Image (cartoon, helix red, strand yellow):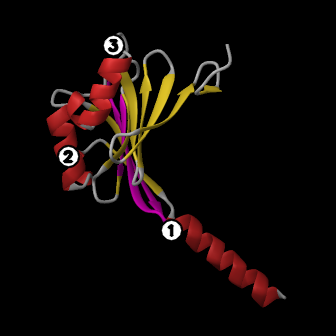
Amino acid sequence: MKKILLTMMVVLAGAFAASADTYSTDRATLPEGARTVLTKYFPKAKIGIIKTEKHMLQGTEYDVRLADGMKIEFDGAGNWTEVDCRGREVPAGMIPEAVRNYVRRTYPDSKIVEAENKTNKFKVELNDGLELTFDRQGNLKKVKDSITKCKNPCPE
């Protein structure tokens, strides 16, 4: 029984050590792709903090907070996975053209302030609280009002 308990404690300690977070303000700690995204889309932004999260199963993730409060998350390869511009517009080049065109046509007075770039979908949040989910081809799949928590279509 002691042997089993000791083994479990060692495994848990290893899991915690393997998922340790580190903090930095040095862009050099980021993968090349992440540095390229920051240079291209946020050229004048100053780094507030870079949090490197190492997970046993998901690998490494990087959370970058800019000094102005914006947040960009990257996977271990340096591909951005989420961006939150804190009420300001997400740089147009980060949004697929089909998604940009749909938002511009359908919600001309709105701007994209957050985006998620996932393997099988692309999700944006507009400044008015609408969340739009698209497939990778740019087809709208779901609309959700994050303020009223209402999914499309909403009851009148």
**Magenta extent:** 51-74
Q: Is residue 98 above or below residue 107?
A: below
> Percent position (x, y) of residue 13?
61, 71
Residue at the disc numbered 2: 35
Tell me the crowding category of disc 3: few under 14, some 14 to 19, or many 20 or more residues within 10 angstroms, Cα based: few
| CA–CA distance in space, label 1 to label 3 | 41 Å
Amino acid type shown at disc 1: Leu
- Which one is earlier in the sequence, the residue at label 2 or at label 3? 2
In screen coordinates, is 155 left or right of 123? Answer: right
Is 154 within the magenta?
no
| CA–CA distance in space, label 2 to label 3 | 32 Å
Q: What quarter of the picture does the N terminus occupy?
A: bottom right
Instruction: Name the disc covering residue 103, or none.
Output: none
Q: Residue at x 40, y 18 (%)?
A: 87
> Percent position (x, y) of residue 127?
43, 17
Q: Is residue 37 above or below residue 76?
A: above
Residue at the disc numbered 1: 57
